[in-house]
Image: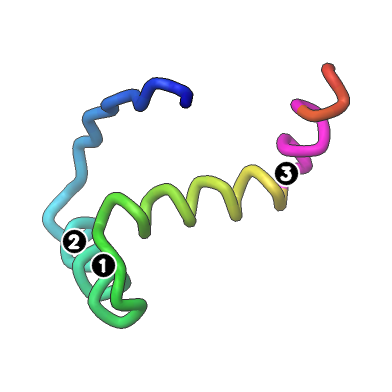
Amino acid sequence: MPRKRVVKVVLSKEQKDILDELARRLGISESEALRTALMDYAKELSLVKEKIAGK
């Protein structure tokens, strides 16, 4: 099983409030909300396809 990595994120008060509300509405943790947002954005930029293709 791959080892988990810890990443610190610095957010403004407004960004933290948005993250809190997003996580609450989705019924997930803040960490999961950030992971989901990151992967959605990476897919939008086609980074996921590039990584899989080995570019």
Residue 20 at what x, y percent from top left? 20, 67
Looking at the rendered structure, the secondary structure element under dot 2 is helix
Q: Nearer the viewer, residue 22 or 54?
A: 54
Q: Nearer the viewer, residue 16 or 48?
A: 48
| Residue at the outermost front position | 1
State the residue at coordinates (81%, 37%): 49
The label number, if any, that marks residue 14 in the structure image: 2
Residue 7 at what x, y percent from top left? 28, 27
Magenta extent: 45-51
Residue type at the position of mark 2: Glu
Residue type at the position of mark 1: Ile
Task: Name the residue tied to disc 3.
Answer: 45
The label number, if any, that marks residue 18 in the structure image: 1
Looking at the rendered structure, the secondary structure element under dot 3 is loop
State the residue at coordinates (64%, 43%): 42
Are circles 1 and 2 on residues that touch, CB within 8 Å? Answer: yes
Residue 8 at what x, y percent from top left? 22, 29
Magenta: main secondary structure equals helix
